[in-house]
């Protein structure tokens, strides 16, 4: 394979394959083949060192706002924020929930705030939390004579 010097230079400078392909108007397949031909070490997706834990990977892409919401800056699968770690993809809300509540969520998670894309662990409820909220609503209604 004939190796282009400009691609090789950028690969050695640890520029991402996607950036090289866009900058030099070549396919990512060409960049990857050049990477392999140069016998360079495998790249870590997204650049930089791999995260030690899935929680660290989540924190690297979660930006906390002053209003309690957390904006996701990482990978999206459609509209679902995804944490990539150890070759696995985990929905970011599940990781956020575990970090906030200290346990894995049970059943489906529902967001309890109105901010689209928020990944704050406190802004998600699983089945046990929703059931507890329903019981509390019924008790409140019974105490104050409101219809539930």
Image (cartoon, rainbow, N blue to C red):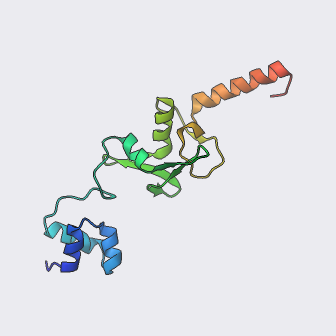
Question: Is 76 displayed left or right of 51 in the figure?
Answer: right
**Number of numbered callouts drawn:** 0
144 versus 76 height, above or below: above
76 versus 143 height, above or below: below
Q: Residue at x 39, y 40 (%)?
A: 55
Which quarter of the figure is the C terminus placed in? top right
**Residue placed most toward the observer, 49 or 147:** 49
- Residue 99 placement (x, y as % from top left): 46, 35
* Quadrant of the image occupied by residue 75: bottom left
Q: Residue at x 31, y 58 (%)?
A: 47
Question: Is 14 displayed left or right of 119 in the figure?
Answer: left
Residue 124 in view here: no
- Residue 2 placement (x, y as % from top left): 14, 80
Outermost front residue: 66
Which quarter of the figure is the N terminus placed in? bottom left
- Residue 89 placement (x, y as % from top left): 39, 48
Outermost right residue: 145
Residue 100 in view here: yes
Q: Residue at x 34, y 58 (%)?
A: 46
Q: Residue at x 50, y 43 (%)?
A: 93
**Residue placed most toward the observer, 80 or 66:** 66
140 versus 99 height, above or below: above
- Residue 88 placement (x, y as % from top left): 35, 47
């Amino acid at each position: 394979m004939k190796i282009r010097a400009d691609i090789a230079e950028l690969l050695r400078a640890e520029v991402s394959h996607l950036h090289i392909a866009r900058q030099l108007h070549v396919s990512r397949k060409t960049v990857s083949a050049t990477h392999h031909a140069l016998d360079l070490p495998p790249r870590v997706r997204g650049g930089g060192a791999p995260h030690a834990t899935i929680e660290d990977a989540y924190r690297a892409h979660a930006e906390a706002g002053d209003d309690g919401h957390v904006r996701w800056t990482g990978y999206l699968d459609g509209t679902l924020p995804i944490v990539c770690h150890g070759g696995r993809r985990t929905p970011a809300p599940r990781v956020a929930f575990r970090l906030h509540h200290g346990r894995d969520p049970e059943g489906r998670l529902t967001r309890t705030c109105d901010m689209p894309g928020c990944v704050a662990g406190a802004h998600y409820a699983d089945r046990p939390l929703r059931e507890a909220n329903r019981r509390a609503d019924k008790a409140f209604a019974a105490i104050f004579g409101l219809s539930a």
